[in-house]
Image: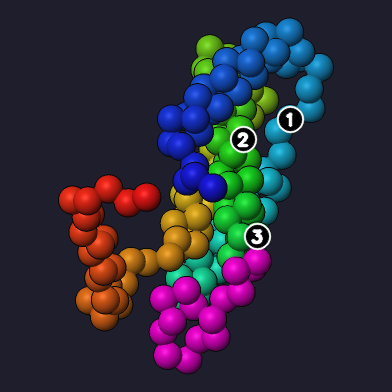
Amino acid sequence: MKPSSTRMLLLVGVVCAAVTRVVLGVIYTDLPPLSWTGVPALLIVAGAEAWTGRDLKARIAGRAGYKPAPPLFVFRMVVLAKATAYTGAVLGGVCIGFVIYLFGLLQAATPRSDMITAGVTFGASMVLLVAALYLENCCRVPKDLDREGDVEPAPPPPPESPFPSH
């Protein structure tokens, strides 16, 4: 499994921002005010992922006092990290779409409040994205330079005989 591509995450965010901006032009007046309750949820998930990444990195490195991490658990954490990285990109794009649309409507109270909420939610989604990329990075197996020196080199291939064999 390849690491998450920052280009792809950026592309997802830009596409979501553009789609959100277009859709809001049609339906914004029918929407209720944005709720700020998503911000604590995003920050709690980001904190949990960062904490898990720190612990998992120590377990993979084999530090004293940590039990080794089962490979299936590490794989599940990689999948979780990739999923939440894309979730952070999508939510960030949607929030930027809101900010772009609402930038011209700041004279009214509700759009101003919605823009502040969208901006704070964007920040929380970027924290989630960074925590997810950190967790994904912590799931990598480090290259152990000490062990490479202990490995015997492969024997050379046998020399070819100048005489054809039958």
| Residue segment shown in magenta | 59-73
In the picture, measured across the screen, residue 56 lies left or right of residue 94, that is left
Residue 31 spot, x, y in % from top left: 78, 22
In the picture, measured across the screen, residue 10 lies left or right of residue 77, that is left
In the picture, measured across the screen, residue 79 lies left or right of residue 126, that is right
Residue marked by disc 1: 33
Q: Tell me the mark number nearer the camera, choosing from 1 and 2.
A: 2
Which of the 4 image quadrants contains residue 67?
bottom right
Which badge, 1 or 2, comes first in the chain's sequence?
1
Which badge, 3 or 2, comes first in the chain's sequence?
3
Residue marked by disc 2: 91
Mark-to-mark CA distance, 3 and 2? 22 Å
* Mark 3: amino acid: Arg
Residue 114 spot, x, y in % from top left: 63, 29
Q: In the rendered view, tell whether residue 156 sits above or below residue 131.
A: below
Residue 68 spot, x, y in % from top left: 54, 81
Q: Nearer the viewer, residue 142 or 115?
A: 142
Q: Residue at x 50, y 33 (%)?
A: 9
Q: Residue at x 64, y 68 (%)?
A: 73
Residue marked by disc 3: 76
* Mark 2: amino acid: Leu
Q: Is residue 131 magenta?
A: no
Q: In the rendered view, tell whether residue 8 sits above or below residue 149.
A: above
Q: Is residue 65 magenta?
A: yes
Which of the 4 image quadrants contains residue 28?
top right
Mark-to-mark CA distance, 1 and 2? 17 Å
Q: Are marks 1 and 3 in contact (CB under 8 Å)?
A: no
Element class at badge 2: helix
* Residue most extreme to the front: 166
